[in-house]
Image (cartoon, rainbow, N blue to C red):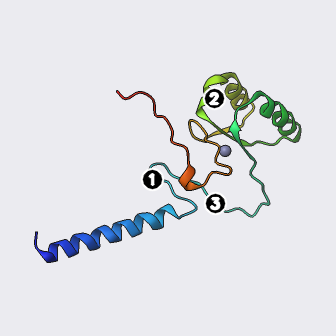
Protein backbone atom coordinates (compact mmCIF):
# COMPACT_ATOMS: atom_id res chain seq x y z
CA UNK A 1 0.00 0.00 0.00
CA UNK A 2 1.41 3.33 -0.91
CA UNK A 3 1.80 6.28 1.43
CA UNK A 4 -1.37 8.05 0.24
CA UNK A 5 -3.54 5.01 0.92
CA UNK A 6 -2.07 4.72 4.42
CA UNK A 7 -2.88 8.35 5.07
CA UNK A 8 -6.48 7.92 3.84
CA UNK A 9 -6.89 4.77 5.92
CA UNK A 10 -5.50 6.55 8.96
CA UNK A 11 -7.82 9.50 8.41
CA UNK A 12 -10.85 7.21 8.05
CA UNK A 13 -9.87 5.36 11.23
CA UNK A 14 -9.37 8.63 13.08
CA UNK A 15 -12.78 9.93 11.97
CA UNK A 16 -14.45 6.65 12.87
CA UNK A 17 -12.82 6.64 16.32
CA UNK A 18 -13.82 10.26 16.86
CA UNK A 19 -17.39 9.52 15.78
CA UNK A 20 -17.65 6.53 18.09
CA UNK A 21 -16.20 8.53 20.97
CA UNK A 22 -18.73 11.30 20.32
CA UNK A 23 -21.59 8.77 20.25
CA UNK A 24 -20.40 7.15 23.47
CA UNK A 25 -20.56 10.54 25.22
CA UNK A 26 -24.22 11.11 24.33
CA UNK A 27 -26.67 11.01 27.24
CA UNK A 28 -29.21 9.16 25.16
CA UNK A 29 -27.68 6.60 22.89
CA UNK A 30 -28.56 3.09 21.92
CA UNK A 31 -26.82 1.09 19.28
CA UNK A 32 -29.55 -1.51 18.80
CA UNK A 33 -32.93 -0.52 20.21
CA UNK A 34 -34.64 2.87 20.26
CA UNK A 35 -34.16 4.93 23.41
CA UNK A 36 -36.68 7.22 25.05
CA UNK A 37 -34.81 9.87 26.93
CA UNK A 38 -37.27 12.71 26.72
CA UNK A 39 -41.01 13.05 26.36
CA UNK A 40 -42.52 16.37 25.38
CA UNK A 41 -45.50 17.20 27.60
CA UNK A 42 -47.18 20.23 29.09
CA UNK A 43 -47.98 18.24 32.25
CA UNK A 44 -45.81 18.39 35.34
CA UNK A 45 -44.80 14.78 35.78
CA UNK A 46 -42.23 12.73 37.63
CA UNK A 47 -40.84 9.39 36.51
CA UNK A 48 -40.06 7.02 39.36
CA UNK A 49 -37.53 4.27 38.98
CA UNK A 50 -35.85 1.81 41.29
CA UNK A 51 -32.61 -0.01 40.57
CA UNK A 52 -30.79 -3.17 41.56
CA UNK A 53 -33.66 -5.48 42.40
CA UNK A 54 -35.93 -7.09 42.60
CA UNK A 55 -35.58 -7.80 46.30
CA UNK A 56 -38.31 -8.73 48.72
CA UNK A 57 -37.45 -5.77 50.94
CA UNK A 58 -37.37 -3.31 48.06
CA UNK A 59 -40.68 -4.40 46.60
CA UNK A 60 -42.29 -4.55 50.06
CA UNK A 61 -41.12 -1.00 50.78
CA UNK A 62 -42.13 0.57 47.47
CA UNK A 63 -45.12 -1.27 46.06
CA UNK A 64 -47.65 -0.43 48.82
CA UNK A 65 -46.70 3.25 48.63
CA UNK A 66 -47.06 3.31 44.85
CA UNK A 67 -50.33 1.39 45.07
CA UNK A 68 -51.76 3.81 47.65
CA UNK A 69 -50.77 6.80 45.51
CA UNK A 70 -52.05 5.25 42.31
CA UNK A 71 -48.57 5.70 40.89
CA UNK A 72 -46.53 3.54 38.58
CA UNK A 73 -42.77 3.13 38.46
CA UNK A 74 -40.10 1.39 36.47
CA UNK A 75 -38.03 -1.23 38.24
CA UNK A 76 -34.64 -1.67 36.64
CA UNK A 77 -33.84 -5.24 37.54
CA UNK A 78 -30.59 -7.14 37.64
CA UNK A 79 -30.88 -10.40 35.71
CA UNK A 80 -29.39 -12.58 38.43
CA UNK A 81 -31.82 -11.17 40.99
CA UNK A 82 -34.74 -11.53 38.61
CA UNK A 83 -33.85 -15.16 37.95
CA UNK A 84 -33.92 -15.85 41.70
CA UNK A 85 -37.23 -14.07 42.28
CA UNK A 86 -39.47 -14.39 39.20
CA UNK A 87 -42.55 -14.12 41.42
CA UNK A 88 -41.58 -10.53 42.21
CA UNK A 89 -41.41 -9.73 38.49
CA UNK A 90 -44.86 -11.21 37.97
CA UNK A 91 -46.19 -9.20 40.92
CA UNK A 92 -44.70 -5.95 39.62
CA UNK A 93 -46.10 -6.54 36.14
CA UNK A 94 -49.51 -7.46 37.57
CA UNK A 95 -49.47 -4.14 39.44
CA UNK A 96 -48.83 -2.26 36.20
CA UNK A 97 -45.18 -1.47 36.83
CA UNK A 98 -42.61 -1.47 34.06
CA UNK A 99 -39.43 -3.49 34.08
CA UNK A 100 -36.11 -2.32 32.72
CA UNK A 101 -32.79 -4.03 32.24
CA UNK A 102 -30.05 -3.11 34.70
CA UNK A 103 -27.47 -5.64 33.55
CA UNK A 104 -27.16 -9.33 34.29
CA UNK A 105 -24.82 -9.02 37.27
CA UNK A 106 -24.49 -5.57 38.71
CA UNK A 107 -20.92 -5.00 39.80
CA UNK A 108 -20.70 -2.60 42.73
CA UNK A 109 -18.60 0.25 41.40
CA UNK A 110 -18.54 2.61 44.41
CA UNK A 111 -14.97 3.47 45.24
CA UNK A 112 -13.60 1.55 42.28
CA UNK A 113 -11.33 3.47 39.96
CA UNK A 114 -11.10 2.46 36.30
CA UNK A 115 -7.68 0.92 36.93
CA UNK A 116 -9.06 -1.24 39.74
CA UNK A 117 -12.24 -2.30 37.98
CA UNK A 118 -12.79 -5.98 38.73
CA UNK A 119 -12.64 -8.45 35.90
CA UNK A 120 -15.87 -10.27 35.30
CA UNK A 121 -16.11 -13.94 34.64
CA UNK A 122 -18.03 -14.82 31.53
CA UNK A 123 -18.28 -18.48 32.39
CA UNK A 124 -16.59 -21.43 30.80
CA UNK A 125 -15.42 -21.13 27.25
CA UNK A 126 -17.36 -23.21 24.77
ZN1 LIG B 1 -27.49 -0.03 40.00
Does dot 2 land on a helix, a strand or a loop? helix
What residue is drawn where x is 64% and y is 23%?
84
Residue with the mark numbered 1: 31
Q: Nearer the viewer, mark 1 or mark 2?
A: 2
Q: Position of residue 44 (x, y in %)?
A: 80, 60
Is 47 placed above or below 105 here?
Answer: below
Q: Position of residue 116 (x, y in %)?
A: 56, 50
Is 25 placed above or below 90 here?
Answer: below
Is 78 placed above or below 48 here?
Answer: above
Residue with the mark numbered 3: 38
What residue is drawn where x is 49% and y is 35%?
121
* Residue sitting nearer the eye, 19 or 35: 19
Q: Position of residue 95 (x, y in %)?
A: 75, 31
Q: Earlier in the sequence, mark 1 or mark 2?
A: 1
Residue with the mark numbered 2: 82
Q: In the rendered view, does 46 fall on the left or right side of 107?
A: right
Q: Nearer the viewer, mark 3 or mark 2?
A: 2
What residue is drawn where x is 60% and y is 55%?
113
What residue is drawn where x is 33% and y is 70%?
14
Q: Position of residue 117 (x, y in %)?
A: 56, 48
Can you say which quadrant of the picture contains the N terminus? bottom left
Ligand 1 falls in quadrant: top right
Q: Residue furthest left?
A: 2
Does dot 1 land on a helix, a strand or a loop? loop
Mark 2 and mark 1 in contact (Cβ < 8 Å)?
Answer: no
**Image mark for residue 46:** none
Q: Earlier in the sequence, mark 3 or mark 2?
A: 3
Amino acid sequence: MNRRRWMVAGLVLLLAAGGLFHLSRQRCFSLILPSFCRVETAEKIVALSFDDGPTEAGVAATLPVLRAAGAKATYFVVGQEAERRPELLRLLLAEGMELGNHSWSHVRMAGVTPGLRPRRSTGPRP
